[in-house]
Amino acid sequence: MPSRLVRKVVYYWKSTTWIYRFAILGVLSTVATVISDIWLDPNFQLAANVSLIYIFVLTSAFTLLYLFRSKWWTNRIGKAYLTKSIVTSLVLLQIVLATWWSLDYPFRQQIRFIIYTWGALVYLPMLATLWGEQRRDRKQARERADCDCE
C-alpha cells in the first residue's frame, strides 16, 4: 500500500498540466545535476550558458506573444508590463552576446549603456503607474466597504 505522501504526489502529478510537469522535471533535474557533482564532473559553466540562451529565448517569445496577441494597450499596467518585458529581453540579449560571442563585441559598452539606461528610465513611469493603480484599487475597496448598500 503506497504511503500517504506517495498518494499525494501521484494525485498532484496527475492533476497538473504538461507545462507544469515539464517545470517540475526541470527543477528536479537541476537539483540532480548539482548533487551529481559529488560523483561526476559536470560543466556548470556550459550548462549555465545554455540555460541563459533558454531564458532569453523563452522571455523573448513571451514578449513577442504578449506584444502581438494581447490587448496590452487597453490599460496602463499592460503598457508597463510590455515595456518591462522588452527591456528584460534586451538585457538578456546583451548578456547572451557577451557570454557566447565575446566580452569585447563591437560597441558593447555603448549598447550596454543604452539598454541599461533605458531600462532604468522605463522603470520610473512603471513604478508611478503601479503605485497609482494600487492607490486607486485601495480607494475603491475602502469606498465599497464604507457603502452600506447591497
Image (cartoon, grey):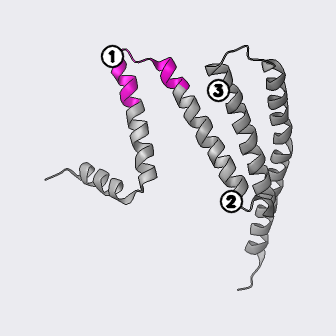
Q: Secondary structure at mark 1?
A: loop
Q: Tell me which segment is drawn in magenta.
A: 31-49
In the rendered image, which residue does mark 1 sit on? 40
Above or below residue 95? Residue 83 is below
In the rendered image, which residue does mark 2 sit on? 69
Q: Position of residue 149 (x, y in %)?
A: 74, 85
Is residue 36 a member of the stretch shown in magenta?
yes
> Could you say which is closer to the camera, residue 121 or residue 9?
121
- CA distance for labels 2 and 3: 26 Å
Between disc 1 and disc 3, the foreground one is 3
Q: Is residue 142 left or right of residue 32?
A: right
Tell me which amino acid carries mark 2.
Arg
Residue at image coords 34%, 22%: 36
Q: Residues within 10 Å of mark 1 (few under 14, many from 20)?
A: few
Q: Are marks 1 and 3 in contact (CB under 8 Å)?
A: no
In the rendered image, which residue does mark 3 sit on? 96
- Among the two numbered marks 2 and 1 on one chain, the one whose residue lies closer to the N terminus: 1
Above or below residue 115? Residue 133 is below
